[in-house]
Amino acid sequence: MEGVEEKDQKMLEKLEEEEEEGEEEEELSSFNINDELHDLEDKLSQIQVHIPEVVYAFDWSSVDTSGLPASYRTNSPKEQLLLQVVENFRQQYVHLCPDREPLFLHPVNECSVEKFVSTTVRPTLLPYSELYDWDSCARFVSDYLTMEPLPSPIAPPSYLYSPTTILRYQRGNCFDFSNLLCSLLIGAGYDAYCVNGYATREICMMDETKEVCPLLQKEAEVTVEAIKQKPKKYAVKPLRDLQSKYELHQAAKETAKEQEAEEKKRKEEKEKIVEAEKPIPDSLYGLRVHAWVLVLSGKREVPESFYIDPFTGRSYDTKDELFLGIESVWNHRNYWINMQDCWNGCKDLEFDLGDPVRWEFMLLGTDKPLLLLPEMEEEDENDDEVEDLMKEEESKAFDMPASWVEPIRITSKEFEVRCPQGKKEILYKNAKLEKWAPYLNKNGLISRLTLYEDPDYSKMLEVKEWFKNREDMMERRELKKQTDVTTEYFAPGHVQGLKAHTYKTMEPETERTMEFYSETRVDGLQKRVETPTDMIEYFEGRSDFLRYRHTEFGKRTKKPANNTQVNTESNARPIVKITERFHRNPEKPADQDVAERIFLISKEKILLTYHYKQNYITASKREFNKRSDVDSTGNKITMTHDMCISYKAGLMEKDEKLFHLYEMMLCLIEEEKLSRHQVWESEMEVLDILRIREEEVAASKLTVSIYDTDRNEKSREHRELMERLLQEERQRQVEQDLDYLAPFLVQMGGIEKMTKWLALRLKEDCLNDFKHHLVDKANLIQARFEKETQELQKKQQWYQQNQLNMTLEDEDAYLSFCSEAMFRIRILENRLNRHKERAPQKYLALEEKLCKDPRLVEYLKFYA
């Protein structure tokens, strides 16, 4: 019995020890849970959000350089060696040319690192065919960037940013413009160079108010000399001139005096205009620094060298008076200094960069060949000296390092938008040109040219507008303010085949001219001219050879309401006369082929004029007097000769029988009815076109290509709907199949190998993973918050840059954007705060769920 009692006592002590161990492990587990909660709360509390402040001005020193590569922040060993070579060259240049201005050699970039200017040029060929030619490439650069004046008008800037940064902020000075344009031109195969020199105030300040708009410059007309015909041997001699030579001489003298007086008056007026438009004298004339692009002849079949002003994209001759001197030029291979005298501007400059007398080069490894050495008396000695000189030059040659600039990239959307914020305004001589990006305006307007009478842009003369992507196919519209005449031009594809429409008002039965694409119309209508009293139509390509129809209308008893269609011919305008003209039908004899047909409806007459027979100077004619079939008493009227008056050119032929004339008159009466009906249809078509045009102008719908996935709303909505449904289906499937312990059970080998220590470890791993998930979600909310704040800051920065030139619509759009952005920012802030509050509760809920899981409950029952 004592042995049994001792055995029972030992079992009780063992159970008590296991219970004490379980209580200690439970306390340890609860202690770990509390530590995890505190750790989670600490990590979440470290995530902070800050509402952005308004940025009032754009500052180049505040450019974000955090994402730039290492080549922007540091110099490679080869670049450092190049800077030493450049500094040595500069010291020698200052010593030998103390009177010359300092060279523009190694300005700092956006990271405040000195870079040689040649390494800032990055030759790039972009995948846009429009940028393959110099003129369109120059226009793109001038449109894409906003001009900024130099910090000092008489000195180059101390900085030169990379083309990628300039494209990112879409603004820069003349050196930035030239550097970008030169990079694109060299990539397109041109022999282009950046130029540091001097120009007039108008060029430096991008003042085009004295220049004629390029859209108004007419191409030079080519005069074709008339070919002199040799006199025929048996030609008839002209009649003798019986006019008095003295009278002709006196008349010529009077005409010459009048022309001389008119020419003198015209010259005086022109001199007054030139004097009035003469610019104000510039105190800094010849000192204003400017940068532009030089394109040398040779490559890309360029016949002559020329300049390109990067601000305007215009080309100039190398001897143009607007450019006053050159200090240096450079490209991605070398740097050249102009050693020629510029006292006469750039008129006498020679651009043979291989001439070391006129152009001093920086590096020996240049692609421009040097001039040949003069011949010496002893050829052998000369050959040895040349070989020694070449070896010495090869040893001293230094290759230009590769450009430190990243590849220039322009997305298709940026290329399409082009202008900063999608719009740009340029002032010319008595003209203002406005440009917009496609789809920026709801009516498809992409450019507008306004012509003024005075240089103060106060008296408007004419407005020309260009459109794109309109559903009604309208391409251009012109409005002349003096006459209030509007002309609209359409591309092929309009509903009614409309090509052009000129009008003063859209009210029916007023003066207007409509032109049509005749090849797209069944009736071959080419043009229709309408006035309140008549209507003229021109045709081509018709099977009945009709080419002209002129309809004269009488006074209407009661005019219908505006823009309402006439339903019946009885309510149409009364027709007084219809004149129709026909082309020659070669299948008919000339005296039977009608050239002109006139229906005198008010006089009940029909006039026919036939085509001229060969070798005849008169045409056959007929006049029909219409009669009703029966008289007032009901008796049938027979055809008589006085009802048809005929004239036949040529020999007298036998008169046609009355039966044939009667049949002809009946056919003409039917033709008259048909012509009147066609006139009525033309009137109905005019009303229909006016109605359609009013609807199209009111709607202003734009067409979107099926390949434009960003703007095609139907395609985008359908795609987003399908993606959303697919995502919801995946989420639902995941929720159904979700097993929070499955990934961890797979790692441990399944439930069969489960022990209480593995169950405890499984629980801890699951809780740690959930904690990381909560932290990641908080970081994601914070990242979205920071993205919204950055977009708001960019918009505020844009507003500060353009607030002086903004319209009321732009300001309303800006305020609306700020309101929506602040709303999203507040939502994200509240979401983050709510997540911080709920995260510990979710953590405790998961811990309780794990303890109650049937797969772990028997192993964790001692820790529950």
Image: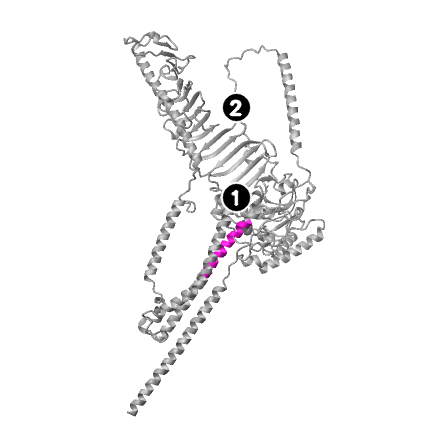
Foreground of the two, 52 or 664: 52
Q: How many marks?
A: 2
Residue 779 located within the stretch drawn in magenta: yes
Foreground of the two, 694 or 486: 694
x, y percent for residue 728: 35, 55
Foreground of the two, 80 or 281: 281
List the residue tagged with mark 2. 227
Q: Residue furthest bottom?
A: 2
Looking at the picture, which amino acid does disc 1 mark? Asp
Residue 853 located within the stretch drawn in magenta: no
Give above or below for 31 relative to 498: below
List the residue tagged with mark 1. 810
x, y percent for residue 385: 65, 54
Q: Residue 854 lies in what quarter of the image? A: bottom left
x, y percent for residue 89: 66, 54
Q: Earlier in the sequence, mark 1 or mark 2?
A: 2
Q: Residue at x 28, y 8 (%)?
A: 633
Label 1 residue SS: helix
Residue 678 in view, yes or no: yes
Looking at the picture, which amino acid does disc 2 mark? Ile
Q: Are circles 1 and 2 on residues that touch, CB within 8 Å?
A: no
Q: Quadrant of the N terminus?
A: bottom left
Foreground of the two, 634 or 276: 634
x, y percent for residue 340: 67, 45
Residue 169 in view, yes or no: no
Q: Which residues are magenta?
A: 778-797
